[in-house]
Image (spheres, rainbow, N blue to C red):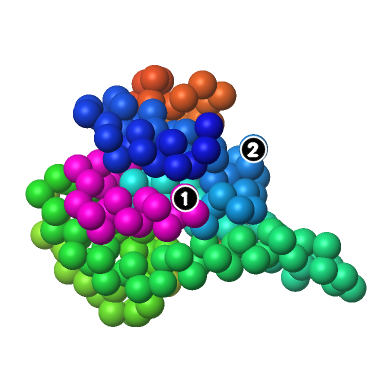
Amino acid sequence: MTHYEVVAQLREAVDRAAARSAAYDLARVAVDDAVAVTPGAASRVVTAVRGLVEAGTPWRADAFAVLNYVVDHAHVYRGLRAGARTYRGEWDWGIAEEEAVEQALSGFDRVVRDMLDDPDPETRSLASLVLARVSGAPAADRELLKMLADAEPDGRARASAVEARLRLGEPEAGGWLTDDAPETRHRIAWYLAATRRDSDPALVPLVRSARPEPEPSWRPEPAWRGPESSWRWPAEEI
């Protein structure tokens, strides 16, 4: 199935189940075997999904989740180049696609900021996580998210804003591991482990105590069919 066909499915989805199914399929088109972006497809998916958001799709959270998934995989080839003693251009095609993904999201932070106060808590949560990945003004956005998080009534949305702040350079993480809200403790413990920032001896016992059970798993079957986490949003189960 081409990315055009899957994008059409997301655009024309009549209910949430259909939207989540299309988002799952789009992520698999854009990322090859959950390892690296797919040359010739990833940037096209990102461009098309961005267009859906800008056109006013009702499935904004699912669209944002696809963008996060692709961006999180758009580093492998450049990492290989950085680690090579002598680079001979063998990953140029993949590097070009990673750079094209970033270019396709240029200026998108302006759109995302407008959705941080969306009436739907899942949408504003995913918007904050997208902003953390595409922000052109990290310091200012970190302060913006702090202000919004302090006033956020939804636990999962507040936890997402905290993660976004850490992604934007918030230096202190340990305090969130003892937060009163379990959603925040679980999300930050997961984030620190996923980014390999949990090796600090002062953080190890806090991460272990805050880590949710069971942890999120990458299931081979479409995640939208599986059980949902108590601290992650349905859109994130890609």
Point out the stretch of residues depicted in magenta: 44-62
Say whether residue 45 is magenta: yes
Frontmost residue, 23 versus 216: 23
Q: Is residue 84 left or right of residue 6?
A: right
Q: Amino acid at mark 1?
A: Val
Q: Is residue 73 left or right of residue 227?
A: right
Q: CA distance from mark 1 to mark 2?
A: 16 Å
Above or below residue 232? Residue 124 is: below
The dot on residue 45 is: 1
**Which percent across, then down, holds residue 226?**
40, 20
**Which percent across, then down, holds residue 95?**
67, 64
Label 2 crowd bin: few (<14), some (14–19), many (20+), radius 10 Å: few
| Secondary structure predominantly adopted by residues drawn in magenta | helix
Frontmost residue, 193 versus 26: 26
Residue 79 picture quarter: bottom right
Residue 134 picture quarter: bottom left
Q: Is residue 78 left or right of residue 100?
A: right
Q: Amino acid at mark 2?
A: Asp
**Residue visible at 44% across and 55% down in the picture:** 46
Query: What residue is disc 2 on?
Result: 33
Q: Is residue 5 left or right of residue 38?
A: left
**Which percent across, then down, holds residue 99?**
58, 68
Inspect this view and state whether residue 227 appears.
yes
